[in-house]
Image (tube, helix red, strand yellow):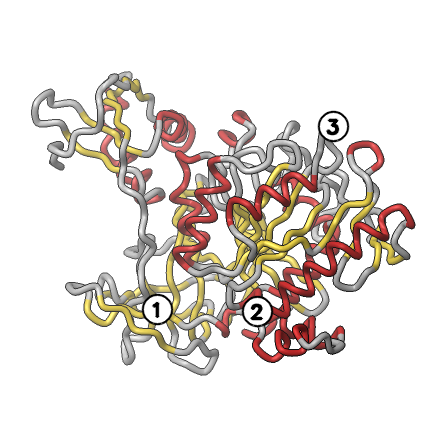
């Protein structure tokens, strides 16, 4: 993939309750942009992002997956995240390195617990976001109700931007109510609005124009005075309103049928911010937790944050990083400001699911991967020794669930501690401690599913057989490490 400048990059995370269709949406986007030549299916275990054996077996996303694609001169790093609460640490990682998000909501299920949770995360970080009402091809899909529920739950800032043409078996496309154009089929062919939907589209457009005007001081005066507002003025004001979290567009479509996907990609490019818009957060006093905002730029000294580590059985440890300032170059040396040590950088890669593409450098705003780093862990900053900085870390939730682990055999006992530590390095929401009262090795995390996945990983990646026992007692704060 070609190199892109800071202004032409978008880092976007997909968020939702489990089962809303994030992985299927990512698959459709990659297919529409021709980065894959066939649509994978979650049921078959053939999607680009859910490639881990545990994900294929359980048919849920467990790991954060980076899925870059290019669209109309812009590179988008799509971050597909798990919707299951046990793996919310992956969500936190993706949001730390993204500037915008797409929140998926099912057209039949509507707002769920995960929808509210991801909304709250976005509110806390003031992240621009787009809603995508997915699964309009399902029986009992109800766009009008779900859109109204979003407005009732999250406020009038949520505004319908697209409305569907039909539903279930008659769903064929979407209507852009700002442009008053219909986009039909998988290729989003532009056409006129069907006559039976003209009145509905005009009603939605009137509300959208009012919402846009209300977000802009100059436009609200013209709106109140009943003066004409040009399409250019509306689009400019809408762009600014989304960037400043004054408005959140509601789009719709079907990931499985690949309808409404191209209009969504257009909206991501046009309305979600580039990395240069958001300031870089630098820790100036770790003891006091003081954070300073500095400007992002390709010409600034190197500053890259490690947001994920993964133990690959074939190439060793993979380190995922986001470059905020400067450029990280293959086969160089950098300074790890958290460990106060030099780190040797080998070949850099761009990742698309599990597939690696070698690159010579990763510029500011972009996301890359490097293998076999010696001292670097998640949340470390890579920079220059001459001008060291520490980027604000990801704040992970504390473990709330625990289980005792024991080796199956004497051979497993010898490798138990080291393999548990490697798993904990991969996932900061996991901790390994010894209970002083029972002398048991205790594995703590965010839920029983997460702990079961850890046990499966230990067997698969490190060949360590583990017995997991989850007592029906709450997590004890008194457990101390050994």
Q: Provide the residue designation for mark 3.
A: 139
Label 3 residue SS? loop
Point out the frontmost of discs 1 and 3.
Answer: 3
Residue drawn 39% across and 74% down? 302
How far apart are labels 1 and 2 at the CA level?
27 Å
Q: Provide the residue designation for mark 1.
A: 281
How far apart are labels 2 and 3 at the CA level?
36 Å
Q: Is residue 287 left or right of residue 276?
A: left
Residue drawn 66% across and 28% down? 44
The label on residue 269 is: none
Front residue (pair 474, 211): 211
Q: Earlier in the sequence, mark 2 or mark 3?
A: 3
Q: Is residue 84 left or right of residue 160?
A: left
Q: Earlier in the sequence, mark 1 or mark 3?
A: 3
Q: Is residue 4 left or right of residue 375?
A: right
Q: Provide the residue designation for mark 2.
A: 215
Quadrant containing the C terminus is: top left
Label 2 residue SS? loop
> Farthest bottom residue?
299
């Amino acid at each position: 993939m070609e190199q892109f400048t800071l202004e032409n990059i978008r880092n976007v995370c997909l968020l939702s309750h489990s089962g809303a269709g994030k992985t299927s949406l990512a698959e459709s986007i990659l297919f529409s942009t021709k980065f894959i030549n066939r649509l994978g299916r979650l049921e078959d275990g053939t999607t680009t992002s859910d490639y881990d054996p545990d994900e294929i077996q359980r048919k849920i996303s467990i790991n954060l997956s980076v899925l870059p694609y290019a669209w109309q001169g812009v590179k988008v790093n799509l971050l597909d995240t798990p919707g299951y609460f046990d793996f919310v640490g992956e969500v936190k990682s993706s949001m730390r390195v993204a500037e915008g998000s797409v929140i998926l909501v099912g057209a039949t299920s509507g707002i769920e617990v995960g929808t509210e949770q991801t909304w709250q995360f976005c509110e806390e970080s003031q992240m621009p976001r787009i809603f995508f009402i997915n699964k309009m091809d399902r029986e009992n899909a109800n766009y009008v109700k779900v859109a109204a529920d979003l407005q009732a739950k999250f406020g009038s800032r949520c505004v319908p931007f697209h409305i569907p043409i039909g539903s279930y078996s008659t769903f064929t496309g979407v209507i852009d109510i700002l442009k008053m154009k219909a986009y039909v089929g998988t290729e989003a062919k532009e056409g006129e609005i069907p006559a039976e939907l003209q009145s509905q589209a005009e009603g939605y457009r009137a509300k959208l124009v009012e919402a846009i005007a209300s977000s802009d001081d100059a436009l609200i005066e013209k709106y109140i005075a009943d003066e004409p507002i040009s399409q250019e003025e509306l689009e400019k004001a809408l762009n600014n309103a989304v960037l400043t979290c004054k408005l959140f567009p509601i789009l719709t479509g079907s990931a499985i049928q690949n309808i409404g996907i191209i209009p969504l990609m257009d909206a991501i490019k046009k309305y979600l911010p580039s990395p240069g818009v958001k300031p870089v957060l630098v820790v100036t006093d770790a003891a006091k937790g003081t954070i300073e905002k500095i400007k992002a730029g390709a010409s600034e000294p190197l500053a890259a944050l490690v947001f994920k580590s993964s133990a690959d059985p074939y190439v060793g440890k993979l380190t995922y990083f986001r470059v905020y300032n400067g450029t990280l170059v293959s086969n160089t040396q950098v300074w790890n400001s958290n460990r106060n040590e030099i780190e040797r950088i080998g070949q850099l890669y761009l990742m698309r699911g599990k597939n690696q593409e070698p690159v010579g450098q990763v510029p500011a705003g972009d996301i890359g991967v490097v293998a076999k780093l010696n001292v670097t862990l998640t949340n470390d900053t890579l920079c220059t020794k001459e001008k060291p900085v520490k980027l604000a870390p990801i704040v992970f939730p504390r473990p709330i669930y625990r289980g005792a682990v024991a080796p199956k055999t004497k051979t497993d006992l010898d490798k138990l501690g080291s393999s548990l530590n490697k798993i904990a390095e991969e996932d900061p929401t996991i901790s390994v401690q010894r209970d002083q009262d029972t002398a048991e090795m205790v594995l703590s995390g965010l839920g029983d599913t997460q702990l079961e996945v850890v046990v499966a990983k230990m067997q698969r990646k490190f060949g360590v057989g583990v017995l997991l026992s989850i007592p029906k007692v709450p997590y004890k704060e008194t457990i101390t490490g050994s």
